[in-house]
């Protein structure tokens, strides 16, 4: 069991394929959980019920991260339900269309930036005052392993997340005096969420899967719990801030 303060972890995107695993891993480590979702109410409630069955408190909160007022209202709901937000995990984001950057039309580009960058900005602005008032807290951003080894056609994921990587370092630098830490998990190919969805659509064919698998030092796909374990570590490693953990199975090493 990890050591958490009173309160809960707030997982944005907690109904997504990776976000579900992160929420469950925090609960297994001893934290109550608030799951923020946009559309998958049934999934969010199922994850919360499973967490509750194992003895932790879990709540669900519908919100659109691109709308600042909605997000502020969600944070107020979470604080009312749990008293404190000790950790914010940013796992929100769209299924990313796999296109060359030169072929990314303006609508796709703006959508990616709006959800990933502006959404994270809204989340920080809404939660930071409460963290300061409570005496500290932690941000864990789920970024992209492409930040280290850029995969072709994944730019609509890597580029927005790179902006958030800079934001994370800024939070670490500026908010450490308030005992607030900020770190990132760089996410590789995880057997959930976007990877499964794009495989189902035929975007990732067998040749792509085989060639990508060859690049892994660990000859298995990552699981959501692998990301969850890294996030729990960063949330509880109280002298670690401004850092990145590349959870990619050694992809591209």
Image (cartoon, helix red, strand yellow):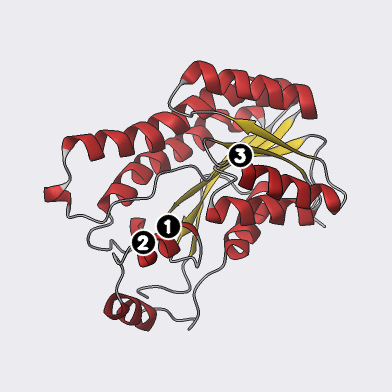
133 or 87: which is nearer to us? 87
Task: Give the distance between the C-alpha atoms of the residues marked 2 and 3, in whole angstroms.
Answer: 22 Å
**Is residue 17 visible from the viewing direction of this image?**
yes
118 or 208: which is nearer to us? 208
Task: Tell me where residue 1 appears, x and y as whole percent.
Answer: 82, 57
**Residue for badge 2:** 198
**Residue for badge 3:** 41
Task: Give the distance between the C-alpha atoms of the residues marked 2 and 1, in whole angstroms.
Answer: 6 Å
141 or 49: which is nearer to us? 49
* Closer to the eye: label 2 or 3: 3
Task: Tell me where residue 75 appears, x and y as whole percent.
Answer: 64, 24
Q: Mark 2 and 1 residues: CB-CB less than 8 Å, in contact?
A: yes
Name the quarter where the C terminus is drawn. bottom left
* Closer to the eye: label 3 or 1: 3
**Residue for badge 1:** 194
Q: First in sequence, mark 3 or 1: give its number.
A: 3
């Amino acid at each position: 069991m990890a050591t958490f303060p009173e309160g809960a972890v707030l997982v944005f995107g907690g109904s997504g394929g990776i976000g579900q695993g992160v929420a469950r891993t925090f609960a297994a480590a001893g934290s109550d959980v608030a799951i923020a979702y946009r559309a998958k109410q049934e999934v969010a409630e199922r994850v919360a019920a499973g967490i509750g069955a194992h003895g932790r408190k879990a709540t669900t909160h519908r919100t659109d991260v691109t709308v600042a007022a909605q997000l502020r209202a969600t944070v107020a709901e979470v604080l009312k339900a749990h008293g404190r937000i000790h950790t914010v995990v940013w796992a929100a984001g769209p299924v990313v269309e796999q296109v060359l950057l030169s072929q990314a039309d303006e609508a796709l580009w703006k959508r990616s930036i709006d959800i990933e960058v502006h959404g994270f900005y809204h989340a920080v602005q809404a939660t930071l005052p409460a963290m300061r008032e409570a005496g500290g807290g932690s941000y864990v951003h789920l970024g992209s392993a492409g930040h280290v080894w850029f995969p072709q056609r994944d730019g609509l994921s890597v580029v927005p997340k790179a902006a958030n990587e800079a934001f994370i370092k800024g939070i670490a630098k500026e908010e450490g005096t308030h005992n607030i830490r900020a770190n990132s998990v760089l996410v590789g190919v995880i057997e959930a969420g976007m990877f499964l969805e794009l495989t189902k659509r035929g975007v990732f064919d067998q040749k792509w899967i085989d060639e990508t698998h060859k690049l892994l030092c660990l000859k298995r796909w990552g699981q959501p719990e692998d990301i969850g374990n890294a996030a729990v570590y960063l949330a509880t490693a109280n002298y670690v801030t401004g850092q990145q953990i590349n959870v990619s199975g050694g992809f591209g090493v």
